[in-house]
Image (cartoon, rainbow, N blue to C red):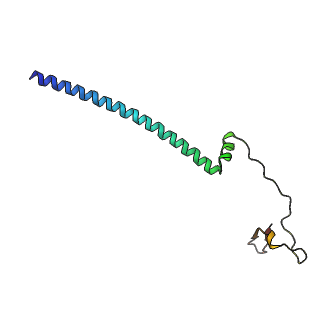
Amino acid sequence: MIETIILGIVILALGGLFLRFTKDQQSKLQELFNKQFKEMGDQQKELVEMLMAGSYQEWLRIKQGKKPEANDVKNEENLLDLTEDNRISFEEITGVKVNDGPKKEIRINR
């Protein structure tokens, strides 16, 4: 009878040790999972920022706080008087924009 009680206490003690060991392992695995999940989230955030910037070089420029390079400004008048003497060939036309006002203005890009 005493052997059964001692055997039961030993089994309960071993069961408790086993449960504690598995809970420790589970908490370590949970911490590892949380760390990896956070790293993946950070990588995804950087990827989204990069995609919104348009390119890797633009993203690096924004991260470093540099200002964008200035665009080249063309000093050409866009509204030209079109007459029979001052024609534009079809090869030069790259786009046509029509204003939707009461007096329609047509802008020809070349």
Q: Position of residue 100 (x, y in %)?
A: 73, 72
Q: Is residue 81 above or below residue 60?
A: below
Instruction: Decide if residue 55 is on the left or right side of residue 78.
Output: left
**Quadrant of residue 62 in the image?**
top right
Q: Is residue 109 left or right of residue 8?
A: right
Q: Residue furthest front?
A: 91
Q: Residue at x 54, y 45 (%)?
A: 44
Residue 84: x and y, percent? Answer: 89, 78
Q: Picture quarter containing residue 80?
A: bottom right
What residue is rendered at 55% in x and 43% in y?
43
Residue at image coords 74%, 47%: 68
Query: Can you name the residue that lies furthest to the bottom here?
Result: 84
Residue 37 position, x and y percent, is: 47, 41
Instruction: Please tell me how many numbered marks the rendered image carries.
Output: 0
Quarter of the image where the C terminus is located: bottom right
Residue most extreme to the left:
1
86 lies left or right of 40: right
Q: Is residue 7 above or below residue 85?
A: above
Q: Residue at x 86, y 63 (%)?
A: 77
- Where residue 39 appears, as percent x and y from the top left, is 51, 39
Outermost residue, right direction? 85
Residue 69, above or below 79: above
Q: Which image quarter holds the N terminus?
A: top left
